[in-house]
């Protein structure tokens, strides 16, 4: 199945289109106060309702923010938007709030736990959240991380399909096969991402108190978050990686787990890849997968956006590698289950020591290098592959190892507070309101800033003369504004004029705006 896919891509000259596959980023991050304690401040009131906000949400805890970019074909574009969202969120924080820079939360005690249990302002999710609290308690639910969304360009799928139409009854079935090959390969290679990007070596005081599973950790590790002690299903739910052995098996197994009460809903399955684009699991069989969500990335505390440009360029090529690499379907269930165990072993290794998978990792990077040459990869991707290849023989270069160097008496609290203070100062002290949009006039930056706060979708485009245009969308209505011809009017009032039905948050600061 799907034989000679790389050769077909080369024959049709599709590499450049694949490099422009859409990528989106979802990043979770905890708010803290200046002392490093989880924030007691409310979700910023200036922000639009979480019932519809496309960019700024919260997760399990009220202090657990979630920032969501639009899909973008360019790494630079998606990272610039992430930076813009981070800037708006930072500038909307109250008091001495700032962002904790790591996936594992700061030190917590029972008072923190109880505060989180008692405060939740998303009524549509309250029943599910109560269920999760009862089953897992608080700590594992406030681990944060990065989810990357990836979709193949439809023109690429349509150009490839004629070569495989004897194998598949429809384009939908072919597209599902492509996406599920990526999914299975990601599970089989998950350990490599854990090795390269794992960045949760220790848990702070109180984290493992009243934990839902027994924990045996005697030294810093690569990634608690990506291990069986992190954001994972409980052993009693029997949800190992064998669930990914086929699309139909995946749907059947998850549906059965929900039906028998092991899972509340499909969203409670915490596997490394989530299928996206349909409401019901069975719809993936009938209507098809639209995109994939990759969920196993720790926040890196060495970049203020939580993910590096270098890592994103690597992932763009790595996804293509997962697409073109054949999967041996012989005993695939057993292979996937073993891959889950291998990932756990890598996650719990000493980050300063070579991984037991070192030789396999070097072989993968050799194949990535060959793929980059075969597809005339961009220089940024080639550089990223070369640099991350060095990690295989130099574990001290990995984020987890670098974090171990910052430990003080087994804790990263001092380091975390320092990074959080620095990033807040850098954001608030920036000369431009939105540094990622420094080319836009000040009035345009002000308008985009307030649009993001209120939950209006925005795009910056250019007309045939190179002039910047702002495309603003709310509830299906799109308004186009020339960036250099915005009237001298308060941004809120101007946006209300464009979108009369937009619900406005009521805050003291808005009364005078």
Image (spheres, helix red, strand yellow):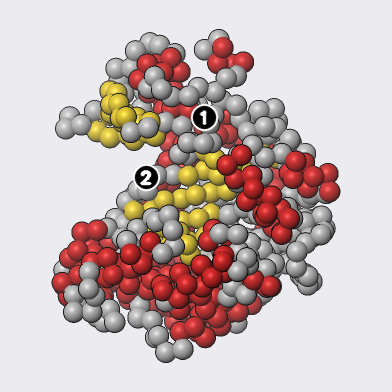
Q: Residue at x 28, y 23 (%)?
A: 482
Q: Is 425 rendered above or below residue 206?
A: above
Q: Is 329 rendered above or below residue 10?
A: below
Disc with the residue nearer the chain's start (2 vs 1): 1
Give me the disc on residue 77.
2
Residue 100 image point, x, y percent: 66, 45
Q: Report the front residue among 480 and 84.
A: 480
Quadrant of res 123: top right
Residue 324 image point, x, y percent: 32, 74
Q: Residue at x 35, y 48 (%)?
A: 72
The answer for how far apart the CA atoms under marks 2 and 1 are is 24 Å
Q: Report the front residue among 77 and 507.
A: 507
Q: Which element type, helix, strand or loop, lies under badge 2?
A: helix
Lateral position of residue 6 relative to residue 454, left or right? left
Q: Residues within 10 Å of mark 2 (few under 14, many from 20)?
A: some
Decide if residue 495 is in sight here: no
Quadrant of res 411: bottom right
Residue 263 image point, x, y percent: 60, 64
Q: Report the front residue among 313 and 12.
A: 12
- Of the 4 image quadrants, the one containing the N terminus is bottom left
Quadrant of res 20: bottom left
Residue 498 image point, x, y percent: 35, 20
Give me the disc on residue 184.
none
Decide if residue 95 is in sight here: yes
Q: Which element type, helix, strand or loop, lies under badge 1?
A: loop
Furthest-bottom residue in view? 330
Give me the disc on residue 48.
1
């Amino acid at each position: 199945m799907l034989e000679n896919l790389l050769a077909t891509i080369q024959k049709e000259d599709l590499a450049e289109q694949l490099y422009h596959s859409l990528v989106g980023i979802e990043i979770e991050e905890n708010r803290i106060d200046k002392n490093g304690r989880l924030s007691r401040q409310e979700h910023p009131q200036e922000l639009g309702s979480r019932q519809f906000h496309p960019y700024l949400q919260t997760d399990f805890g009220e202090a657990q923010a979630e920032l969501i970019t639009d899909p973008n074909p360019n790494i630079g574009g998606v990272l610039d938007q992430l930076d813009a969202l981070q800037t708006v969120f930072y500038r909307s924080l109250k008091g001495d709030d700032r962002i904790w820079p790591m996936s594992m939360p700061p030190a917590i005690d029972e008072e923190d736990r109880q505060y989180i249990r008692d405060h939740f302002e998303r009524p549509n999710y309250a029943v599910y959240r109560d269920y999760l609290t009862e089953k897992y308690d608080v700590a594992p639910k406030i681990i944060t991380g990065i989810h990357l969304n990836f979709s193949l360009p439809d023109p690429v799928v349509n150009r490839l399909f004629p070569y495989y139409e004897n194998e598949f009854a429809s384009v939908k079935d072919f597209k599902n096969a492509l996406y599920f090959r990526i999914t299975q390969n990601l599970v089989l290679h998950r350990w490599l991402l854990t090795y390269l990007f794992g960045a949760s070596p220790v848990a702070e005081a109180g984290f493992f108190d009243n934990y839902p599973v027994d924990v045996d950790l005697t030294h810093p590790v690569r990634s608690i978050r990506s291990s069986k002690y992190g954001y994972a299903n409980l052993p009693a739910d029997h949800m190992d990686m064998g669930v990914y052995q086929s699309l139909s098996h995946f749907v059947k197994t998850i549906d059965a787990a929900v039906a028998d009460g092991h899972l509340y809903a499909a969203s409670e399955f915490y596997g490394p890849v989530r299928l996206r684009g349909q409401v019901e699991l069975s719809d993936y069989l009938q209507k098809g997968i639209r995109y994939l969500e990759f969920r196993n990335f720790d926040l890196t505390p060495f970049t203020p956006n939580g993910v590096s440009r270098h890592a994103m360029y690597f992932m763009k090529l790595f996804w293509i590698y997962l697409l073109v690499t054949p999967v041996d379907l012989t005993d695939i269930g057993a292979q996937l289950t073993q891959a889950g165990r291998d990932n756990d072993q890598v996650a719990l290794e000493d980050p300063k020591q070579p991984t037991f998978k070192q030789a396999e990792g070097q072989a993968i990077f050799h194949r990535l290098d060959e793929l980059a040459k075969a597809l005339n990869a961009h220089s940024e991707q080639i550089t990223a592959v070369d640099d991350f290849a060095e990690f295989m023989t130099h574990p001290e270069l990995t984020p987890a190892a670098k974090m171990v160097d910052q430990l003080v008496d087994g804790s990263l609290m001092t380091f975390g507070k320092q990074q959080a203070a620095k990033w807040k100062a850098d954001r608030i002290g920036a000369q431009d309101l939105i540094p990622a949009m420094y080319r836009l006039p000040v009035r345009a930056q002000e308008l985009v800033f307030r649009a993001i706060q209120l939950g209006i979708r925005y795009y910056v485009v250019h007309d045939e003369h190179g002039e910047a245009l702002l495309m603003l969308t709310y509830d299906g209505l799109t308004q186009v504004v020339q960036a250099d011809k915005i009237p001298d009017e308060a941004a809120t009032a101007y946006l209300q004029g464009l979108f009369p039905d937009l619900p406005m948050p009521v805050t003291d600061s808005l009364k005078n705006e």
